[in-house]
Amino acid sequence: MAIGPIVRAMKHNRMRFSLIILEIAITLAIVTNCVNMILAERAKMKQKSGFDDDHLITIFTTPFAPEFRENSYVENVVNADLRAIKAMPGVKAAAVTYFLPWAGGGSSGIWKTEGYAGKFQAQIYAARGGLFDTLGVKITQGRDFRENDTPVDPNASTTVTIISRALAKKLWGDANPLGRVITSGEGDRPRTVIGVIDDFYNPYSWNIGEFVLFTPGRAYGGGGHSYLVRTEPGAMKAVAQQLEPTLVKVNAGRVFRLLTIAEVKKNFFAGGNLVIRGMTAVIVVLVFVTALGILGITSLAVAERTKQIGTRRALGATKGDILKHFLTENWIVTTIGLFLGIAATYGLNFLLVTQVADTKMPWYLVAIGMGVLWLNGLVATIPPALRAASVSPAIATRTV
Amino acid sequence: MFLYNIKIAIRSLRRNPVLTALLIGAIALGICVSTTFIGLRRVFEKDPLSGKSQSLFYVRLDNWDPARAYNADDPRSLPIMISYRDMRELMKSDIPARHGGTYRASMFAHPDPKVGRPFNCDIRMVFSDFFPMFNIPFRYGSGWGKAADAKPEPVVVIDQAMNERLFGGVNSVGRTIRFDERTYKVVGVIGDWTPPFRFYDITQGVAKVEGVFMPFNFTQVLELNTNGNSDGWKGQADPTYASFLQSEQTWISYWAELPTPEKQQAYREWVNNYVRDQKKRGRFERPLHTEVTSMPAVFEEYQLVPPAIKSMSVVSLLFLIVCSLNLVGLLLGKFLARIPEVSVRRALGASRFQVFLQHVVECELVGIAGGAIGIALSVGVLQLIEKIIPQNAIRIGLDAEMVFVSIFLSLVAGLLAGIYPSWRVCSVAPAMQLKVQ
């Protein structure tokens, strides 16, 4: 198969082929960059929290009755609430806490410890015994909080803490973290590490998503508090429906807001999901549009050259020769477009990285993108090429 | 003549409805995608104060830990907000035309029992300057005066949704409403004011504006705590509220209106002098660092526009280009098939320019039709996106300016796609084709 005549024939239609080349180049740039963004978003979503996310419910209570000003009143209500929740059918465990997985934030502080140079930042949440059981996370070293770990005075600081494995590793490497003392940034309020939980991830700025201190404490006050409830598999719906009526029966002087952790997580990733959906739609439509474009332009080329094709056929070219001619033509154009597209891909990626802090483009994405678009071009050329091959040699004898 | 061109163009478009639908569809698709993503970006980037934001400045002071920067990885970082005690001192400056601190609190509204049960609501604590500073329009009444700030008087400003919920939407100025334990008089109902998010509090991200505004000085009276962001490093001397107000805890956003460059310069100097003075008293142990940043610059710094949306708007423009390229191919085919007809027109005396114009008009008709369909589609897509975003956190929609941009884009797309095919067809020699037939 001689490439020479094909290239010479193409030179007569420079504009048409440069259209396809440009289109393919831009398409490659868009598709690879979109896939890159989708992969970056998905990587964020894949992160595991370490908790039993699918069976957790949170219910916020905000009191408006003035009696809630009294600490002892709140204490009584919280205890009665927990008893009532735990007595519900389908409930595995429940705890009162300010910690909410996947809320996209929480509280943090700055701490110091012996064996670690400088200060470090970590999330901190008050917890009472039962929180870890409720979250469904295992204490792999040491022990859980006991009731007498919680100080009687709500303003007093606690003396013990349970931390995440990742924090222990950051602070002391592989050494045993139990018994070590963490203090505030000023060196006061010492807390001894009594336990380590294996998995912990809660999204937080400053990259402290895996670092946490839990301290025993009364995670409630006059301003409201929330409960985390873990249910049996399959009991989610029933428990979610009954939770508010149950708590209203305990005390009606407050309002409630119930969310499943699955919903909280969904809300947290709503932006990312939007990006993924938007990008996917763009990719699908774009590849389709490009295929249509190639199809249209090639059809045009075939229609225009019907007479020449007939002449070639009359002079002895087989159907296969004609088919090969158009496929080769398309192959040349697609290949040029794809190589131009490599430059366009990295150009666009550079623009996005410098302008809007996107991620760098891995080479294999470009390679896969090229493969897909190359196939796409081939598929789009086949129908018009087949039509060209079916042109009868007799056409050559007609005038128009 | 021009009308005649349009008439001929419409006739030509009608002759091949399938091809015309393809042409219009290509433009509509490109315009829909680009309008959607550029419109989404504009929701975040649009000046919420139509031109005034250049004269509004956000104040930050580095009162952080001497041993460690606010963001440990960046020694030049400083807290996003300021402490209560610093806000009190900044309020003493007479350089800004208007200024004040603000934060979000949370209270229970107790409506008339006939209206409904008590409900929890977000309350924005502000000084009287807040309303004129952010150009807030009023439907009924107005904001409160300086006297109400100082005392503080039990007054509130509510938005229309809250007015609807509490008073059924009537003019409620002078009516009262209980929040927690106190009763407040409504002095103003905010009019048509729909910023997409709480731009006056950059830590709040994308969230709708609060429905109730209350004099800031109730903070001390009611011992309120912020329901928004709060960062600290030092803790407080004792657990009393007075000690909390004297602590280094940063939880207040501070804005100052500085209309002239001289005032901006003077104010920066004034703020620096304040910090120098405080340093003598043992506070602000880090190197002197204050920032008085214009509103657009501070939005840019904290990336209030999600990066993904910026990327998508760039990508969507490229998408429009691909659609135009497709259009070029389709038009080329359509016009070249018409060469015999064109050469007859040329032979009968039509000039090259007339033929060219005729075809460009046809392309622009396609552009306008495709643009209109694309804009309509993108309005629907944006509404869908607004529904997907949880809790309707932001208002998304196209404003007049964006519609103009989209129409302009569709005209440009039609023109760019049409020029080359039109030029090809008008350069046909008049008699050439006649000979053959």
Image (tube, rainbow, N blue to C red):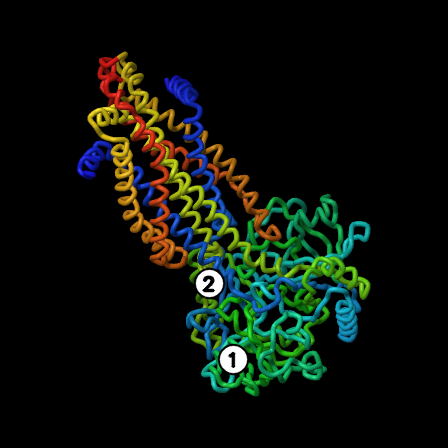
Kindly identify which numbered label has been placed on residue B162. none
Element under disc 1:
helix
Q: Label 2 marks which chain's residue? A: B
Q: Could you tell me the amino acid type at mark 2?
A: Val
Q: Is residue A219 left or right of residue B411?
A: right
Residue A325: % across, % down: 25, 35
Quadrant of residue A157 in the image?
bottom right
Count neighbours of disc 1 (C-alpha within 10 A) and say few if under 14, some if 14 to 19, many if 20 or more: many
> Can you tell which of label 1 and label 2 is closer to the viewer?
1
Estimate the spatial distance between the alpha carbons at disc 1 and disc 2, rounded to whole Å: 40 Å
Quadrant of residue B22 in the image?
top left
Whether label 1 touches label 2, CB < 8 Å: no
* Residue A19 appears in the figure: yes
Residue that mark 1 sits on: A168
Residue A183: % across, % down: 55, 83
Kindly identify which numbered label has been placed on residue B292. 2
Q: In this view, does A226 lie to the left or right of A87?
A: left
Q: Which of the image's four quarters has the C terminus of chain B?
A: top left
